[in-house]
Every structure is written in structure tokens, then in C-alpha cells.
Image: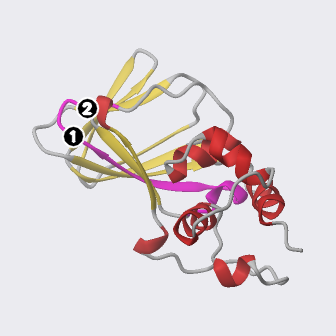
Amino acid sequence: MLKIGKKIKNLRLLNGLTQQELADRTDLSKGFISQVESEQVSLSLNTLESILQCLGTNFSEFFSDEQKDKIVYTTNDIVSKEFSENGYNIGWLISDSQKHRMEPIMVNIEPGGETIEDDPHDGEEFGYVISGTIELILQKKHYKVKKGESFYFKPQLPHRIRNTGKSKAKILWVSTPPNF
């Protein structure tokens, strides 16, 4: 008999995600993910599809014994999370980026909004401002970055982004290794 929960857990671990991270990306609770992985609950097809999408796979790949690397990702593959209290949202452009060396996201920040501060970590970060004007804050240093400009830094200091403009800011942000 196919153990769906065990297979989901293996995929989650392969993608380097905690139960909480998978729960956040699927708008499910950590407890529910735990129950799924321990075969305590049945999944609707919609919930299974959402989980599989976040783990970078689909029904046919999940139920197949062959594993293939995905090459093209569409808007249907984007997994989003809203941080309404901070005035921004994140869209993971590559749903299975946790198993790769880099993690590209799209960040949309409302005027006056700002991302949650990220702690120092290994790797590199790159961003390109598609629209709006932002302020990149690296601990106490502030850098203004406008539409068409980019930023690059080694995240050795706490960092965040604030929208200082009067319109929504849209940023393509890439972290290596995956960190979002």
C-alpha cells in the first residue's frame, strides 16, 4: 500500500523544509502537516495538490517511481504568502527552490510596508527593483534603490527592505543558498 504521508515527509526533508515552513507555504497548520505525514488524516485532492506544488512536484511525478528535474515554471507554480500586518507579500517563483542552490522570490511591498528583518546567514543575496523605490537596510546603513536598479550583498548583517515610495514596489529577490 502506498504511504502518501511518508512520501510527503521524504519530499519535504529532501527540499530542506520544516513542517512549519511547509505549513506556511500551503496555508495549513503545522499540526495538520504532522498528521498527514503520520498517516492520521486523509487528504482532499486540492490539499494534496497544494502540498505537492510546494514540494516542486505534481500528481503524475508524485505517483511515478521516476524523478525528473523541472525546467520551466509557470505562474501556476508560484506559491505566495501574505504578510498583511507588514504590508508585503512573497511569491516563491520556483516552488521547489529549497532543493536548489538559489531561491528566487517576487516581493510586493505596499507604500510604507517593510519586510521582516532577516538575521545574518551564509550566502549571497541579489535583488532587482522592477517597480517603485525601496530602501535596503543592512543593520544601520540605508541604501535607496529605484526602479531598474539592483542590489547585491553578503548577508552578514541583519537586513530588510522598506518601501519609501508612494506606489507599490516590486522586487525580484534571489538568495543563495535558499533562505526565505
* Horizontal and vertical percent position of residue 142: 34, 24
Report crowding for label 2: few under 14, some 14 to 19, many 20 or more residues within 10 A (C-alpha).
many
- Name the residue beneath numbered marker 2: 113
Q: Is residue 152 magenta?
A: no
| Residue located farthest toward the front when viewing the structure as drawn | 41
Q: Up-down: is 126 above or below 160?
A: below
| Whether residue 17 can be seen here | no
Please report the bounds of the magenta region as a residue range: 95-114
For the point 79% across and 55% down, which residue is it?
A: 39
Point 65% across, 72% down: residue: 57
Residue type of the residue flagged with mark 1: Glu
* Extreme residue in the right direction: 1
Q: Secondary structure at mark 2?
A: loop
Which mark is on residue 51? none
Farthest residue toward the left? 166
Q: Are marks 1 and 2 in contact (CB under 8 Å)?
A: yes
Give the residue at mark 1: 110
Q: Which image quadrant for residue 110? A: top left
Query: Left of 48 or right of it: where is 63?
Result: right
Q: Percent from the top left, x then y, of residue 47?
A: 55, 63
Q: Nearer the viewer, residue 15 or 126?
A: 15
